[in-house]
Amino acid sequence: MDVRDEGGELIGTVCVVPAKEGGGREVVLMYRSGGTRSFGDIAALIRELERRGAPFEARKRVVSFIAERLTAERRPG
């Protein structure tokens, strides 16, 4: 999911991917400017997006996106 700042500039893309170990999931932010960062704590991701200028509505969409991805993997079938 792409995340943009208040001015519409792309901050980066948030992804939910399989973790290397433990069979869980990992939340990753790939910055447009280069580099990636893994977040084990969703609150830390939200603080980072806020620091980078993502508006409240964009941060809410990111939380919903992550929740959707994490609950989808738990549904049978």
Image (spheres, helix red, strand yellow):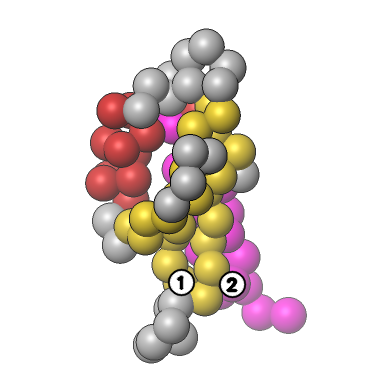
Q: Is residue 55 above or below residue 45?
A: above
Q: Is residue 63 visible?
A: yes
Q: Secondary structure at mark 1?
A: strand
Magenta span includes 65: yes
Question: Mark 1 and mark 2: span between their CA atoms?
Answer: 9 Å
Quadrant of the image occupied by residue 23:
bottom left
Which disc is residue 73 wearing? 2
In the image, residue 20 lies at what x, y percent?
43, 83
Quadrant of the image occupied by residue 59:
top left
Instruction: Specify the segment rendered in magenta.
Output: 59-77
In the image, residue 50 lies at what x, y percent?
33, 28
Task: Provide the residue designation for mark 1.
Answer: 25
The amino acid sitting under disc 1 is Arg
| Most common secondary structure along the magenta stretch | helix
Residue visible at 26% across and 46% down?
Answer: 44
Magenta span includes 75: yes
Q: Toward the viewer: 13 or 74?
A: 13
Q: Secondary structure at mark 2?
A: loop
Query: Marks 2 and 1: in contact by CB < 8 Å?
Result: yes
Which of marks 2 and 1 precedes in the sequence? 1
62 relative position to 49: left or right: right
In the image, residue 68 lies at what x, y percent?
57, 54
The amino acid sitting under disc 2 is Glu
Depth check, mark 1 against mark 2: the one in front is 1
Residue visible at 48% across and 38% down?
Answer: 33
Pointer 1 local density, CA inside 10 Å: few below 14, some 14–19, many at least 20 = some
Q: Quadrant of the N terminus?
A: top right
Pointer 2 local density, CA inside 10 Å: few below 14, some 14–19, many at least 20 = few
Q: Is residue 55 above or below residue 46?
A: above
Which disc is residue 5 wearing? none
